Image (spheres, helix red, strand yellow):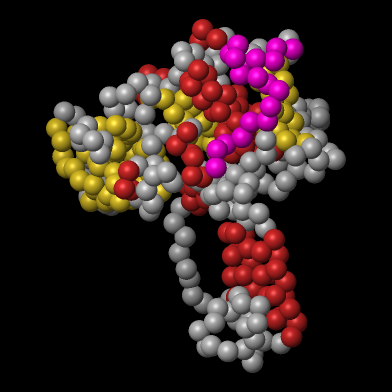
Amino acid sequence: MSDRMDFLHPDYEPGEFDQVERRLRQALVRDAAQVRPSNRLDTILHEAHELGPVTATGGSGPRRWLMPLAAAAAVAAIIGGVWWSGQDDRSGVTPPATNAPSLSPTPSTAPTTSSPTTSGPVATESVTLPVYFVGPVGGAEDKYKLFREFVRQDLPVGATPAEKAKAALVLAINAQPYSNTDGYLQPWSGQTIGDVTVADGAVTVHLANAGVPEAVVGDENKRLAVQELVWTAQAAIQQTLPVRFEVADGSTKLFGSISTDQDFTRPPSDRLYEDVAPIWVTSPTRDQVLPASKPVTVKGLAIVYEATVNWQLDRGTTTVSSGHAMASIGAPMQGEYSFSLGRLAAGDYTIRVRELSAKDGSVSAEKAVTFTVK
């Protein structure tokens, strides 16, 4: 047997491991092989946002024989949660991960609802919820796609998946906080989110009304308005379960044209462009204040031609610097990109990340984020 064989291989058996440990490794490999991947970008990004950079430390720790088992478990977890940003969590494909902790599936025999069942004061905690909105992609074309925002919200301690989903959906139907700065549409004005249940392998969302057809221009934007609720609900529960809608008055057509007699979900990873904007900027965040003592790094996600993004850093009306960067993969897949702006003088800045047209070099998509250095 080759000395280079990976220790996770079921036939790998160095002398220091006994038979019990070998069987444990084999069991982990078998379990990992049976897992069906789901998109976990939302989770990964959320945990990174909450915990910050992870560093390795030395010192004493578990016995060496535990390390391969921990690694095997990590591999199994990764196999079971590759992206959704991935981005997020999609069954059988790879989303965004959310900034919220990953949740275990809800047993179908015990539906959870968004309404607390206990009386008296309820202890709450602040959590970060991934929320999706329909916004302009930028550039010359009047085109809209989905953008994700991470929003802090107070929820009951130990909130159920259904409670998290309802809270996120309530935020999703109110784009007002971002309309003036990002141009997000408000297709669900006048809507109310009723009960949300996670049961029988699906998420069911009860709406007060079917949506006003005149509130959204164009069939594609109506479709995206529905999809923003689908992506939000799935990201909140960290599972890409199908989403179903029920309307209080019995309506069967959302916005007058989209049948509720169907299950809704995200497209697969090679068709995310159908829903997701070409450019996301995940760091710095909107109006974030960064220290002047440290270099500024811009990070994000992109579905762009030949994996190339161009960028421009402005301070007021002055362009400070510009350049380009490569995403981890090109369209039609969504890749990650990162580039450094170096240390910046104190002031207010706007970073613009763009996709340029392969045809004529014009801007076909752009996302701009303002931030401050102090």
Q: Position of residue 346 (x, y in %)?
A: 22, 40
Q: Position of residue 254 (x, y in %)?
A: 62, 16
Q: Residue at x 67, y 39 (%)?
A: 241
In what quadrant of the picture does the C terminus appear?
A: top left
The prevailing secondary structure element of the residues shown in magenta is loop
Q: Is residue 120 visible?
A: yes
Magenta segment boundaries in residue numbering: 250-268
Q: Residue at x 75, y 27 (%)?
A: 115
Q: Position of residue 313 (x, y in %)?
A: 22, 39
In what quadrant of the picture does the N terminus appear?
A: bottom right
Residue 156 left/right relative to 295: right
Q: Residue at x 75, y 39 (%)?
A: 201
Instruction: Pick the residue in front: 267 or 12.
Output: 267
Residue 30 left/right relative to 213: right
**Residue 149 part of the magenta-drawn span:** no
Instruction: Pick the residue in front: 278 or 128.
Output: 278
